[in-house]
Image (cartoon, rainbow, N blue to C red):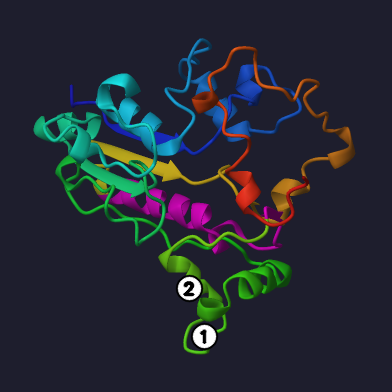
């Protein structure tokens, strides 16, 4: 029979708080349907609570202690120049391999240093980064980053496309999915599947959300009653956890609107 194809989906900063993991208040019908057709692993763990270390570990089968990648600055090939990655192994065995979005570390078009061309049959593709889409969100960007966002020769969308800018911690613009980057990524994934369906392929699709900032089309926020959402009872780290494992919410504190 023909070789099985692989659609590898990465989702940034997603905890297993999904319907298929027994969270009835979370509405995830598409992931739940996918889970119902396959296997759900209930005893799995993030290799390290940071993008680059965990992705480098997952895509090479090496522990972070072996890769020695513990932050988002170091590149995979500088640490392990000869390692064979998961997509590279498929490529060696005749598969067409392609990367869309954030698979290895790097979200924006300007994030070139973490790309891994040897793993892919064609260059990596990333959607234009669109982080904010409300007048309030764009006003905050103009205030925080006046030089690029007050340039009359470029629209805010053109400025955001090149790299990420921190602004509001969240917003819910009333826009269609493909007005934001993850919607554009999904469209590109569907288009690519149609293009490559007749050959053996390993297609990796890396979504950026729910990584901060927490921006999604309004229709998804409208699925929930904010007054019905219960916060965790315990907001303290576990006892005897080393400092490396707890960053004091430094990620979200770089955005506007986070309570002290």
Residue for point 52% across, 85% down: 151
For the magenta stretch, what is the residue range? 169-195
Element type at marker 1? loop
Pick whichever, 90 or 119, lies toward us.
119
Residue at image mark 2 = 159
Q: Quadrant of residue 179?
A: bottom right
Element type at marker 2? helix
* Discs 1, 2 touching: Cβ within 8 Å: yes
Crowding near pointer 2: few (<14 within 10 Å), some, many (20+)?
some
Q: Which mark is residue 151?
A: 1
> In the drawing, does residue 217 fall left or right of residue 111?
right
Separation of marks 1 and 2 at Cα, in angstroms: 9 Å
Residue for point 32% across, 20% down: 65
> In the drawing, does residue 226 fall left or right of residue 187?
right
Q: Quadrant of the C terminus?
A: top right
Q: Earlier in the sequence, mark 1 or mark 2?
A: 1
- Residue 171 on the magenta segment: yes
User: Residue 15: x percent and y percent?
Assistant: 58, 28
User: Residue 177: x percent and y percent?
Assistant: 58, 56
Measured along the vertical axis of the image, is residue 26 above or below residue 171?
A: above
């Amino acid at each position: 029979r023909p070789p099985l194809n692989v659609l590898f989906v990465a989702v940034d900063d997603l905890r297993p708080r999904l319907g298929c993991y027994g969270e009835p208040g979370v509405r995830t019908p598409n992931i739940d349907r996918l889970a119902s057709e396959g296997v759900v692993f209930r005893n799995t763990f993030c290799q390290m609570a940071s993008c680059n270390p965990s992705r480098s570990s997952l895509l090479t089968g090496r522990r972070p202690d072996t890769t020695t990648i513990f932050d988002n600055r170091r590149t995979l090939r500088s640490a392990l120049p000869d390692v064979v990655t998961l997509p590279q192994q498929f490529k060696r065995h005749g598969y067409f391999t392609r990367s869309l979005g954030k698979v290895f570390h790097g979200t924006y078009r300007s994030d070139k240093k973490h790309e891994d061309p040897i793993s892919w049959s064609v260059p990596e593709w990333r959607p234009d980064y669109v982080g904010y889409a409300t007048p309030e969100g764009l006003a905050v960007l103009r205030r925080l980053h006046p030089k690029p966002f007050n340039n009359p020769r470029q629209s805010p969308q053109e400025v955001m496309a090149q790299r990420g800018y921190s602004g509001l911690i969240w917003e819910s613009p009333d826009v269609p999915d493909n007005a934001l980057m993850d919607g554009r990524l999904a469209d590109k994934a569907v288009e690519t599947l149609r293009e490559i369906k007749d050959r053996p392929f390993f297609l990796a699709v890396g979504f950026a959300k729910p990584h901060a900032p927490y921006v999604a089309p309004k229709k998804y926020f409208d699925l929930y009653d904010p007054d019905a959402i219960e916060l965790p009872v315990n907001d303290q780290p576990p006892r005897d956890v080393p400092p490396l494992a707890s960053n004091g919410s430094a990620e979200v504190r770089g955005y506007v609107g986070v309570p002290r």
